[in-house]
Image (cartoon, rainbow, N blue to C red):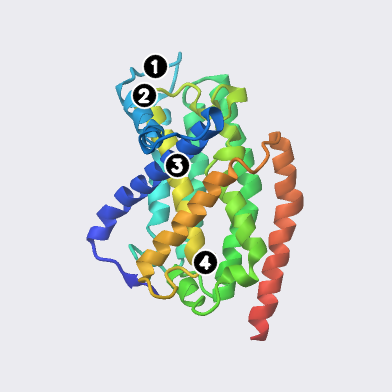
Amino acid sequence: MADAAPLWATAVLPVALILAAVCAAGFDAVLSAAAERGRAGTVREMGVRAAAPLREGLRLLAQQPRRTTAADTLLIRLGVALVPLAAVLAGAVLPWGFRSVSDPSVGVVWFNAMEALSWAAVWLAGWGPNSALSLIGGYRFLAQGLAYELPHMFAITTAALGAESLRVGEVVAAQDGLWFVVWMPAAFVVYLLSALAMAFWGPLGHPLSRDAAGGAAAELTGVDRLVLLGGRWLLLVVTAGFSVPLFLGGGHGPLLPGWAWTLLKTAAVLALLVVGRRLLPVLRMERYMESAWLVLVPLTLLQALFVAVVVLNR
């Protein structure tokens, strides 16, 4: 069981997640600029490119709001606010080394439930503007979320099965000596892929894709758009961070303190996901759906069966 973090950690958690999200967005902006205009010639130029998400955030803060005819403002605001809120609540069970804000006996279930909350959030944000394109984006996320939630859930459950506990602290403790990624590689890979889908980001960003003029975010402007897009980055950070206690040994590692190992591992996974955006092909949504149902779900079930046999015989 993880030690309880001090009370001030509750206030620090959202700030830390936002800083991590800004850094990840800056890294992605540098990679995008390098792909479009070539590598930065100087450190100053690289810094200017990395600050692009901050400039865009300031622009959205100053932008005048725009509303479609008969839009449901309450529904929009509720959906938009729920995305970052779900990410922060999910982050409450993330161990910083061997301490977390909260380590309930069903922490693994709590994390997955908060992720699922984003389904409703994106759908509400897409429904509220009373626009066909944003509604299409919202329904896309429902379809994508359902297809990828099952392999995502099975991958998470496999780690809990290996630890014989749903408490995140005990999952970390069970990896003292051997990380789960060593004997659960399929679950780890599926978790990372489904994390992109749950954060509707990168090649799995169909709910907000350009072919639907921005999908669920098509009619959002100003602060509403900033909160939704920022919430998506927070979801990506949290899902990347949760792979560390599930599969990468949490704070276990030589020489460095536990919190430093957690930070390094989270940064490495986050960088892998950001870079992976450019390595994975962008397919039509139905192709991704087929791969989820026909490949990922059976693969995670076989991985869970293997882990169950090992657990029963040890």
Q: Position of residue 258 (x, y in %)?
A: 38, 70
Query: Which quadrant is the C terminus positioned in?
Result: bottom right
Q: Which one is nearer the viewer's eye here, 80 or 39? A: 39
N-terminal of the pair, mark 2 or mark 4, is: 2
Q: Which residue is mark 1?
A: 66
N-terminal of the pair, mark 2 or mark 3, is: 3
Q: CA distance from mark 2 to mark 1?
A: 8 Å
N-terminal of the pair, mark 4 or mark 1, is: 1
Q: CA distance from mark 2 to mark 3?
A: 23 Å
Q: CA distance from mark 4 to mark 1?
A: 45 Å
N-terminal of the pair, mark 2 or mark 1, is: 1
Q: Residue furthest top?
A: 69
Q: Position of residue 169 (x, y in %)?
A: 43, 71
Q: Amino acid at mark 2?
A: Gly
Q: Which one is nearer the viewer's eye here, 61 or 304? A: 61
Q: Which residue is mark 2?
A: 222
Labels 4 and 1 touching (C-beta < 8 A):
no
Look at discs 1 and 3 and give the one toward the viewer.
3
Q: Position of residue 68 (x, y in %)?
A: 45, 15
Look at discs 2 and 4 and give the one toward the viewer.
4
Q: Amino acid at mark 3?
A: Phe
Labels 2 and 1 touching (C-beta < 8 A):
yes
Q: Which residue is mark 4?
A: 248
Q: Which mark is residue 202?
A: none
